[in-house]
Amino acid sequence: DVKVTQSSRYLVKRTGEKVFLECVQDMDHENMFWYRQDPGLGLRLIYFSYDVKMKEKGDIPEGYSVSREKKERFSLILESASTNQTSMYLCASMSGGTGELFFGEGSRLTVL
Amino acid sequence: AQSVAQPEDQVNVAEGNPLTVKCTYSVSGNPYLFWYVQYPNRGLQFLLKYITGDNLVKGSYGFEAEFNKSQTSFHLKKPSALVSDSALYFCAVTGGKLIFGQGTELSVKP
């Protein structure tokens, strides 16, 4: 059974803290994505990666960075968390250009 | 600009009745179209996709979707709704990258 695992389901951080969100997939997919989900706004793409050490900005990259040192792992980094980054973060992977995404369970981040 | 619209924030249906969740899109070329479902506090799950061929696509859990090129629509349908179908539904389309609609909350009452 295919799987995308996000390391933390719920996090509470303080303003200014550095936050790491980890995502691991076991499907050998080339493409991985980080989305942010907010009510009424749907899913917004933060960053994506189509290969190891490659990254591309999505629609809302400001305040975020990513790391992909291994094919199976894609990390989202908030260098200095702010309250407006309180949200649900979803990681996904995709094989080739199929368009079919496999999602993790999500990480709900609260920044106080 | 490429976009996906789900015109209804919420759809309410009685159990056993047919349901429709609407989606329209504006993308150049011949896009791939998708429906995903999200149950509470979970990630999204793939339901079905249209790439080419028959305009009626069948997917998981008895859902189907009808592609209409002239109306640029891809509505999700099910002949008989279940309470367990209550969830958040997202339409998505590829236009170079995958673009999601804002989501429609489906509520099925007994």
Image (cartoon, rainbow, N blue to C red):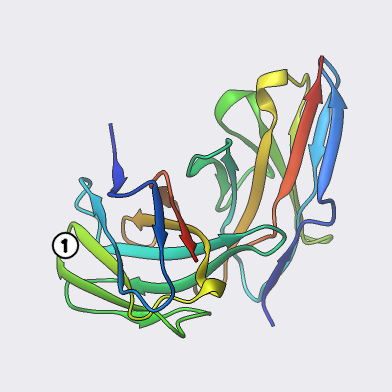
Say which quarter of the image contains residue B107: top right
Q: Nearer the viewer, residue B39 or A27?
A: B39
The residue beneath circle 1 is A71
Q: Secondary structure under badge 1? A: loop
* Quarter holding residue B100: bottom right
Amino acid of disc 1: Lys
Residue at horizontal 74%, vertical 47%? Answer: B104
Residue situated furthest left in the rendering: A70
From the viewer's side, name the closer residue of A102 and B50.
Answer: A102
- Badge 1: how crowded within 10 Å, few (<14), some, or many (20+)? many
Q: Is residue B12 left or right of residue A38?
A: right
Q: Chain of mark 1?
A: A
Q: Position of residue A98 (x, y in %)?
A: 41, 56
Of A9 and B59, which appears nearest the observer? Answer: A9
Name the residue at 41% across, 43% down: A105
Figure quadrant of the N terminus of chain A: top left
